[in-house]
Image (spheres, grey):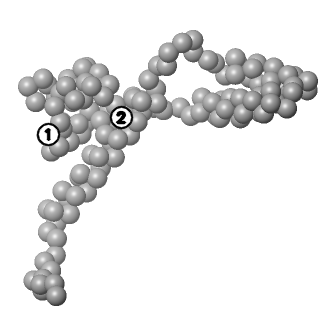
Amino acid sequence: MAAKRGPKTPMTDEHKAALAKGRVEGRVVREYLEGLRATKPKRGRKRTAETVATRLETIDAELESASPIDELLLVQERRDLRSELESMSDIIDMKQLEAEFVALAKSYSQSKQISYQSWRDVGVEASVLKAAGISRRN
């Protein structure tokens, strides 16, 4: 049989505030890092909405005379291109995410014991870390 627990003590207001602060800092850092990843330049020539639209038109023309296997491949490519076109319209406001990150990064970094180099390794610019008050000594 499990040992009896003592009486539950309610959380203090300070503890609740610390938990809330941690949740906010974690959300801001996560959103900033996700934004960095989403806006990271990809290799090769950058595709524009116009080039994707042109390829979609070409696919529609090719579908009329395509063999069954080519039709399958073209339909999948069309689906992928439409998805890519939709994601192009999703605008990420990195200025706002960066400003929020700068305001909370030092506190988050200290509480989680994250080094300067770890931030750099995941793609955070040195100028952003400097603005946040995180130096190589931290």
Residue pictured at 75% horizontal, 20% vertical: 55
| Image quadrant in which the N terminus is located | bottom left
Q: Which mark is residue 33?
A: 2
How far across and down, in percent of the image, does residue 27 sit? 34, 46
Residue 75 lies, with reference to residue 20, above or below; the image says above
> 31 and 4: which one is in front?
4
Q: Earlier in the sequence, mark 1 or mark 2?
A: 2
Residue type at mark 1 is: Gln
- The residue labelled by disc 1 is 113
Tell me if residue 89 can be seen.
no
Q: Residues within 10 Å of mark 1 (few under 14, many from 20)?
A: few
* Image quadrant in which you'd find residue 121: top left
In the displayed structure image, the side of residue 21 where residue 78 appears, left or right: right
Residue type at mark 2 is: Leu
Callout 2 secondary element: helix
Residue pictured at 44% horizontal, 23% vertical: 40
Spatial CA distance of label 1 from label 2 is: 17 Å
How far across and down, in percent of the image, does residue 36 sit? 39, 29
Residue pictured at 53% horizontal, 32% vertical: 91
Tell me if residue 108 can be seen.
yes
In the displayed structure image, the side of residue 95 where residue 110 appears, left or right: left
In the displayed structure image, the side of residue 40 where residue 121 appears, left or right: left
Q: Residue furthest top?
A: 45
Residue 3 lies, with reference to residue 111, above or below; the image says below
